[in-house]
Each structure stands twice: as C-alpha cells, then as structure tokens.
Image (cartoon, coloured by chain):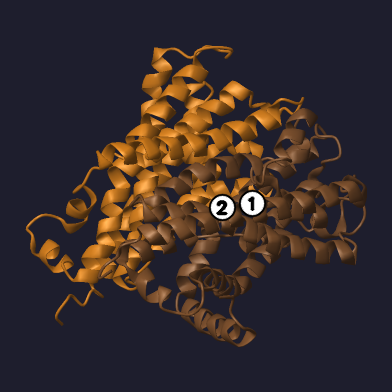
Chain colours: A orange, B brown
Amino acid sequence: MEYRANFVLATISSLASMGGALFALWALLRTEYAMNGWSFNQALIVVGIYTMLDGLQQTLLAPNRQQISEFVRNGTLDFVLLKPIDSQFWLSARKVSVWGVPNLFLGLGLIVYAASFRLEPAVDAANYVRLLVPLAVSITIYYALGYLLSTLTIWFTKLANVTHAMHALLEAGRYPVAAYPGAYRAFFTFVLPVAFMTTVPADVLLGRGEFTWVLGGLVIAAALLVAARLFWRYALRFYTSASS
Amino acid sequence: MTPTPRITKAYFNAFYALMTTYRAEIFFWVIATTLPLIMMGIWVQAGASGAFEGFGSVDAARYFIGVFIFRQLTICWVIYEFEYDVVSGRLSSMLLHPVNPLWRYILLHAGEQFTRLPFSILFIGLSLFIFPEALWGSGEQPGTWLPQGWRVLLALACGYLAFLLRFFISYTISMLAFWIERVSALENLNYMPYLFLSGLVVPIQTLPPALQEVILWTPYPYILWFPAQLIAAPPEAMPAELIARGLLTIVGWITLFAILQQALWRRGLRHYSAMGA
C-alpha cells in the first residue's frame, strides 16, 4: 500500500519535470522562432529520449550508485572485495529499482507519439532499430560518469550531492544542443557529453544521424568506461577498510 | 513567543557555524540548482532570433541571472527538516524551548543561505563571464545593465518576501506531517506549479497576455519572476501599478499561508504523540 502511493508520486514527479520541458518548448516554438531547424515534434523526441534515459538510469544505475557510498561508510566494502568476482561488476549490477518505470514508459510513449506524425521523412521501424546503438552509448556514458563520481566516495565518504549535481547538469539534455549558444554547445559536447546522450539518438531516430557523431559517441563511451575502470582500480589502493 | 534580537543572533550564529561544516555539500547543491543557467542558454539563443518582442538575448541573460539570484535566495527545504523532526520525535525537545520552532527553521535557512552566498556569487560571476553582453549590452541592444537604486533595494526586499512566501507554502504543507508519515513526497505536488508558473523555465512576459493575467493571481510568479524582473527588465516593462499589484499579492499570499499554517500547527500539536509523549 505504501509502495503504491510512492509509485503514484513518482509518476507525478516524472510528469512534472517532463511537463516543464514541454511547456518551455511550447512557449519557445509557438512563435516563429525556428530553434535551428528543430520543429516541435522533433524536439519532443529529444525530451522523450531524455525521459527514457532517466528512467533507465533510475532503474539500473541509481540504486547501485547509492549503495557504493553506503558500503564504504559502513566498511562492508571489505566483504565485496573478498568475493571471487569482479568488485566493479558486482557493485554495478546488484540491484534493480522500479522507481524508473514511470519515466521509462512516459519517455517511450512521448517518442512514439511524436515520431508518428508531421515528420519528414517519416520514422519507420528500421529507425527504431538503429536507435538502439546511440541509446546504448548514452546509457554507457551515464553509467561511466556516475561510477567515476561514486568512486570519489573512497576518499570523501559523504558525497550525496555530487550525483545530484551531475544529474542537474545532464538536465540540459532535455533540449537539442542546437538550441544552445556556442559556448554551451562546446561544453555539452566536449566537457560533459550531453550532446551524445540525447541529441545524437534523436537525430538517428529522425533518420538524419551522421555516422561521425555516432562513432564519436562510441569512442567517448568506450574512453569513459576505461577511465571509470582505471580510476576504480586506483581508488581501491587508497581504501583503508573498516578495521585498519 | 517571538525571539528577542539576542536570541535571534545566537540562533543565527549557531546555525551558520553548523552549516559551514557542510560547505562542500552545499557547493555541490549550488551546482544542482543551476537550472536557470541552463534555461538562460536556451532563451539567449531564442532571444537572438528576434521572435520575442521586447525580449532579446540581452534581456534573456539579465532575466535568468536575476532568476538564478532569487532562486538562491528562495531555496527552501523546511519540509524535509520538519518531517524528520516529527518522525524522529526531535520536535518534542524543541517544544520545550520558549521559542516557537518556526523561528528556528527560518534562521536555519538564513544560516544556510549565508554559507551558500560565496558559491552563488561564483556562479553569477561565471554567467557574466559567459554573457558579458548582460552587463555592457550588445549591438542590437546597447546600454549597460544599471537598474535604478530603489528598484534594486525593492527587489532585495521582495526577494526576502519571496523567501517567506515559499517558506510558508512549504511549511503549511509540512504541518501535514502530524497526520501522515512521508509528507516530503507532497513537495513534488508543490514543485509542479512552481516549475510552470514561477518563471523558472519560461519567462512569464513571453506568454500570451490572457495566460499572464491568470498566472499573476497565483503566488508562484512572485517567488522568482517578480523580483528578477525588478532588476532585469527596463523600467517601462515594470510600471508602478504592476509593482504595487505585485507587492499586494505577495503580502496577501504570505498572510493567507501564515494563518493556515498557524491553524494547522495548533490542531497538529494536539494530535502529536511523539516518542515518550
């Protein structure tokens, strides 16, 4: 019973934040403003992909991320390290949460709705299949960034707000990068790769994805994954465990 | 009882000291509240297109810097604090103090605001660095950003009123903690109208006039849009009658929520049966 109420509230807050983005897009595009060639329906797909990605990370990534700092604080990371399987894998794939489900379905619904009409060229089934590659790239980037930050808890045990901060900056991905001025675009492409997480997948679904951007996303995702791995190995050397 | 200046000072000093121990956390929290700066990017780009009459990229940059400032001033987390105090029973010991806990919460926020101040200034500096046009004006919109002194003072006063308004809305909802366990979840319901109507993602003046009129009757635009407009907009966009209307509305809403809160507080205390009571 308690969980059902929480689920309703999770849905409401998902609706609220998605609604905020839709409201902004409506206010922007009800005039003759062209937003660098992104129509309302096309921009909706970016919002949809952001919302779905958020749902995916709430389901798969966030519950595990939160646990890492708990393990470090309680000293129970010792037991994890003693297990014969890889500690990063064990820590990353331990829990699944249902709180991301509303976002997942809202995002998916919005994508399918927005892709169904008023688009040139029309979106067909093959586009949805092609979408899987950039979508895998974005969730990988999200995972790697999150893991990099979680690793910091080895040194600073209490860092709850760091992932909040990351999440807030990633919110820029609710809008296509083309809607930002140059300085922002550079930041969200090269510093915090938001562009590869939502705009590139949307472009691919719309059938105007460029090979170099998809490839660039793959390279960034791979590089961040390696970086997360190396950083974790490095950090473990500084882990002093519970009793020593 | 309302606290004497001496008690106020003691509370403030204690809470400021308390909050400075969390300064690293608070720094990251400032990053977590930079949505106005993201929206600034979107609207500066949109303003440059000239599609919004009287709202160019310079106006957009000034407006969202204003929104950022007043968002920093009106951040309110009383509902989480109060929920914890009720559920854990910590409220019982506070009730033994001769001062109404209301003042304690307000001063707790003041201490946190003061700790956050240097970080907020850092981000204001950053946005002025990204958009120096906000200060000096651009080719299309020349002129430095120099609002009249009385408007700045009024905006600051309105900023604190805005904080009180936001605080009393949240604190009124918090009172439900006497009856239900997880009251902080209700903050989500309050967040939705706040997101839409406060001017955080969409500047109210760019909306259709009929919609603006409706929004201006709600309390939300006075939390961010109104004080931000006082410092960001050209004087003719904020005429005296609009300012007067704003001041009346904000005071009206604060009074309404304060009365409601007090009524709920009295009923709630009778219902309250914490640990050991």
Query: Would residue B193 be found to the left or right of residue B126 on screen?
Result: left
Q: List x then y, in percent, for residue B158.
A: 74, 60
Tell me the residue that label 2 is attached to.
B260
Q: Nearer the viewer, residue A111 or B36?
A: B36
- Label 2: chain letter: B
Q: Nearer the viewer, residue B145 or B104?
A: B104
Residue B270 location, x and y as percent? 39, 60
Residue under disc 1 on the same chain as residue under disc 2: yes
Q: x, y percentage for residue B167?
A: 57, 59
Find numbered disc 2 in the image and state the secondary structure of the residue it sits on: helix
Q: Which residue is mark 1?
A: B256
Residue located 31% across and 47% down the image: A61
Query: Vertical placement of A23 versus B245: above or below?
Result: above
Q: Is residue B139 visible?
A: no
Tag 1 near tag 2, CB within 8 Å: yes
Left or right relative to A47: residue B67:
right
